[in-house]
Image: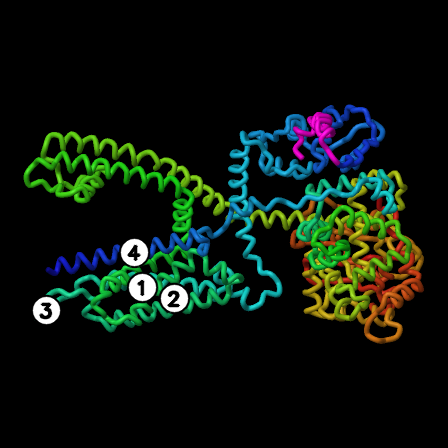
Amino acid sequence: MLNAIWETEGLQTVGIVVLVFASIKLLHLLGLISFSEDSVEDELELSAVRHRPEGLEQLEAQTRFSRKELQILYRGFKNECPSGVVNEETFKDIYSQFFPQGDASTYAHFLFNAFDTDHNGSVSFEDFVMGLSILLRGTIQEKLNWAFNLYDINKDGYITKEEMLDIMKAIYDMMGKCTYPVLKEETPRQHVEVFFQKMDKNKDGVVTIDEFIDCCQNDENIMRSMHLFENVL
Amino acid sequence: MASGVAAWLPFARAAAIGWMPVANCPMPIAPRDNSKRQDELIILNVSGRRFQTWRTTLDRYPDTLLGSSEKDFFYNEESKEYFFDRDPDAFRSILNFYRTGKLHYPRHECISAYDEELTFFGIIPEIIGDCCYEEYKDRKRENLERLQDDQEENKDQKLPNMNFRETMWRAFENPHTSTMALVFYYVTGFFIAISVITNVVETVPCGSTANQKDMPCGERYTVAFFCMDTACVMIFTVEYLLRLFAAPSRYRFMRSVMSIIDVVAILPYYIGLVMTNNEDVSGAFVTLRVFRVFRIFKFSRHSQGLRILGYTLKSCASELGFLLFSLTMAIIIFATVMFYAEKGSSSSKFTSIPASFWYTIVTMTTLGYGDMVPKTIAGKIFGSICSLSGVLVIALPVPVIVSNFSRIYHQNQRADKRRAQKKARLARIRISKSSSANAFIQSKRNGLLNELLELTDEQKLAKSISLLESQHHHLLQCLEKTTAHEFVDEQVYEQNCLERALQTYASRSPSISSHDSSEGTCCGRRGKRNTPLPNASLPSSHQGPLQELSAIHIQCGDPPSRTASRSNLNLKTDNSGRINCKGGRITTAIISLPTPPALTPDGDGLHGPPQRSIQTTASSACTNIVKVSAL
């Protein structure tokens, strides 16, 4: 008699176990539960973003580069990024290779935002070439405008001290640790103070584009250095 | 529109004449083809190998590089051909795609190289033909698995600005990141083990007291076991709730396998608390006890081997399913046969077909317990056929499972090896990085030499610095000027730190020298050369007319650059050449004065008066005096 009781209990157990597994399988089928931790298959479906630039003639018209220069630029660009667009990670990698001693990723982030004029998260060849055209062949006004745009992180038309501090820290980060004299904590801040003293004419705590351009145009050293990279290409 | 039908379009348009008599409305104007180009041969020069094809062949796929105007970027006017600096072998299959409309994957090609070529030419890999698609996908999956291992290691990187929640999640996922995580890991492992052992020991018969028969320990020490169980479940509940809180995507976490196992492990306890000891559901109560053993699966978080096994089973799910299905089929067939064969014999154990299932399973898996044996001749014949076929059926899917397991296991071993080699790899990468940084510092000194000796342009060119390097060095110099700090070697940096800890005055007194380190016309500082300044340093070399630059480099132990300034060779090398330095180079620590910056407007007043620079005087035996006199 005892055996009979044990038998039925055991069968009940079996029944319940089967029920539980069946319900788990059902939930899995319904997609509520996923059994694969890392979806390797999904990664394969991510097709890379591909981008083709506008025609050579159009780019020639829009920028100040000659046909040959555009060709050279495009070949280099496409070699580095076969898919035709640079995303931020790749950009940071590329830029960091030039500054082995420090950490160039923060500054590369700001630079990326300055090049990515339509803010879609990737720099296409057009963005790249437009930026370069301003920087290498533009007028002083355009170059200063570009620099202002770089410093103005939130693109609201004013450079605040916080934004300038971020940029300054990013630049000092690129120097790395082994510098002479040794970098102190307050060096970027002091640098920012000096900058604001020079630029902020009306002492309202922000630098507008006009103050910036005015001040830079009056500074002979800055003017001279703006012509520095004209023969890059 | 697919390419193949493009050739038939003129035919379809011509055949549209057939609609004209029937149409009621006037037809729209046909588009004119303004570019009346004759079909011409295009030459594609891929790294020297010339391919020729018709222009219309390439125009078949206008959304790829070759089919669109993007190839104009690669047009070479002089030779009237399109030049691509890519692999010519891989290009063959790409050009064949245009010709035949089918993309094939050459098996000898590396998968990532092929992928890059496809991306470069703007072709999506999904259109690889059926003949090669399987191979392509398999290779890609393998490669991805391999790369994923690498990425998982990189997940250890501590991101800046991680809030508490992210830190906790990282600690949970990877116990080696912090001590707290390790402690937590071991504590949970310990409690899982305790819980499982408790479940096991509960059923062991403890010593019997005089009046009762052997009782299992669980019934004897009910309270103790209950307390232990409660403690374990508390820990597991807390762990689950913490994980739930820290998970970046709670929905995804709740759907994952490990969280289901966690829930299944702790739920029976709570259900048991709620349920009373009702007779009707006693079966369910027993089941709950069974489920407690699932806690052992929580070990899979702690053990890599278990995870491999689980992954193998999952990837062989279809083979296992086939095995199960074919076995079931065979069992049913043979059980039926055995039942009817043994029906005749008296006192046969084969009372029903389900009863014969047991015999069939035991025989097919070659266990052969012997509790049920056929007695009739027909039964014995069928029994032997059953055991032979059992061997075959089981042997078929097993090699597939084994090969899958072997592949995954080897991959894991490779990952472990790579992890072990990672340190060496990182060290090598760091060395190469520092060598490139040192190259810059080195070239700065060489640059000084150039100025000093006033090399002519040809001689300058004869130096091994390439244009690229010199441009890179110029960029670094501009950064130096912007921040008014200089790049120095690691050793010098450490010396400086040491010095500053020791003293701050001795470095000022001996000499002041200012130096203009620019070798080029960075910021146009050439004009500074003419300010004379005396300088002296401890192995005091007095230079009278300071129109020359004296740069002293003492290098110990490094073969590459044993340069010494020509004008000071006699002074320096004898007494200071053989210093026991720590085995590195002594570099000149130069301070360049904050001249107006390259890119960012900088304040002049930041670094005090010009014409002042500090030299480093190191008093420790390992260093030498570095001084630069500049003009």
Q: For residue B334, which quarter of the picture?
A: top left
Q: Check disc 4 and report the residue beneath it.
A: A17
Q: Which portion, as a residue range, is magenta?
A: B1-24
Give amino acid for label 1.
Answer: Ser
Residue found farthest to the left: B346
Give amino acid for label 4.
Answer: Val
Query: Could you tell me how far apart the alpha carbons at marks 4 and 2 are, in whole angstroms?
Result: 22 Å
Q: Residues within 10 Å of mark 3 (few under 14, many from 20)?
A: few
Whether residue B371 is visible, yes or no, is no
Name the disc covering residue B236, or none: 2
Q: Secondary structure at mark 3?
A: loop
Q: Secondary structure at mark 2?
A: helix
Q: Residues within 10 Å of mark 1 (few under 14, many from 20)?
A: many
Q: Measuring from the top left, give residue B378's x and y in whole percent.
A: 13, 30
* The one of A117 and A206 positioned closer to us in this rendering: A117
Query: Could you tell me how far apart the alpha carbons at marks 3 and 4 are, in whole angstroms?
Result: 33 Å
Give amino acid for label 2.
Answer: Phe
Query: Could you tell me how far apart the alpha carbons at marks 1 and 4 are, in whole angstroms?
Result: 21 Å
Query: Could you tell me how far apart the alpha carbons at marks 3 and 1 are, in whole angstroms?
Result: 28 Å
Name the disc covering residue B212, or none: 3
